[in-house]
Amino acid sequence: MARPIWSGVINFGLVTVPVQMYTATQDHTIHFRQLQRGTSDRVRNKRVNERTGKPVDYDDIVKGYEVADGEYVVVEPEELEEIAPGRSRAIDVSGFVQLSDIDPVYFARPYYLAPRGEEYTKPYELLRAALAERGKVGVATFVMRNKEYLVALRPQDDVLLLQILHWSDEVREPQEELPSLPEQSDTASARGQELRTAEQLVDTMTVDWNPEDYADVYEDRVRELVAAKAKGEEVTSAEEPPEATNVIDLSEALARSLEQARGEGGAEEGRGGTGRAGGGKKSAGQRQRSRQSTGEKRGTGRKQGASKEQGKQGASEKRGKQAQQGKRGSGGARERLADLSKDELYRRATERGVPGRSSMNRAELVEALGGGGAGKAA
């Protein structure tokens, strides 16, 4: 069971609710040790005196604020506690606002709040239910570990969530910080057929939010890398990022994206899933399974077709016929493949089971799909 990291009260109006705070998330990242290259010797960070180079115990470290060059004002932890003893034990709600009124850029870390005992569950639930019914969140401040925080109290199904917010002077203005943003002329030009196609693409790719449909793929790759290196095995490189879409190809890329998304929706309906015709939405996991299932069925169909053809004509006759067809059609096919993006090429290579596709560049994917790779897949 989790341990509380803070204990205090929620103040709203004349009501006081004793609560305890718990971390709401946990880190699943693989953590590496620092080693000296060529050895198994660990490298550690130590607290040392800058002047003498000698280690300093944690209890002998105090906080100092530099007021002039080399001149500090020393502040003890007890002095920080004394200046705001009440603030460090209370979450003071100053008002209630609509959650949609808070820009997402202000949200930081989340924590769970729980009543400090069974006798406090009624006022706790009263606050949670009132916020849920009104669709509001409480805006409050409190002090923890010698730092004041701006927070939002958000109701969930059966718990209050405390969300740390950034202060206004901590949020940067994008117009001042970013090198390039769309101008008014760009916004005005983003209309017409391209916008309608983009909106249709968004509608077609709309899914129900289910966090379990998503996984940290990069973290999985790191674990595979560590496991493979421990066994002395090699790890294949992942595919390169897709090339940027230029303005000239934007309309075509949108149209092809919409066609692809609709095709995946049709494939899902054909297998009895919740497709567009029935008004249902597919999850990201369903889309992934749809792509995998489609690729497997295509591969199975090609193998069955090849087996029947060999039964009718014989192996030698089939090879001769394929060679003639390859001479006639390979040039046009490769020309069409060369027009596709690397992302689309990789998707087709995945469907056809082209071996080694994850380490291929764009030209190699075109070659594999138009020549030898396609033959292997079949």
Image (tube, grey):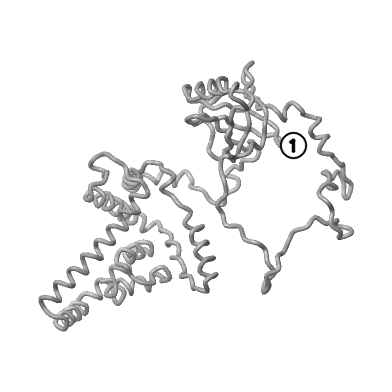
- Vertical arrangement, residue 83 with respect to residue 378, above or below: above
- Vertical arrangement, residue 123 with respect to residue 99, above or below: above
| Screen quadrant of the C terminus | bottom left
Say whether residue 204 is left or right of residue 180.
left
Q: Residue at x 47, y 30 (%)?
A: 157
Q: Residue at x 67, y 70 (%)?
A: 40
Q: Amino acid at mark 1?
A: Asn
Answer yes or no: is residue 323 visible.
yes
Q: Point out residue 143 in the picture as x, y percentages from the top left corner.
A: 70, 32
Q: Point out residue 257 in the picture as x, y percentages from the top left corner.
A: 32, 54
Q: Which of the two residues, 61 or 324, is positioned nearer the viewer here?
A: 61
Say whether residue 246 is left or right of residue 227.
left
Q: Point out residue 319 in the picture as x, y percentages from the top left corner.
A: 18, 81
Q: Which of the two residues, 350 or 125, is positioned nearer the viewer here?
A: 125
- Vertical arrangement, residue 14 with respect to residue 233, above or below: above
Residue count near mark 1 (Cα–Cα under 10 Å), binned few <14, some 14–19, many ≥20? few
Q: Residue at x 86, y 43 (%)?
A: 67
Q: Which residue is labeled 1 in the image?
A: 146
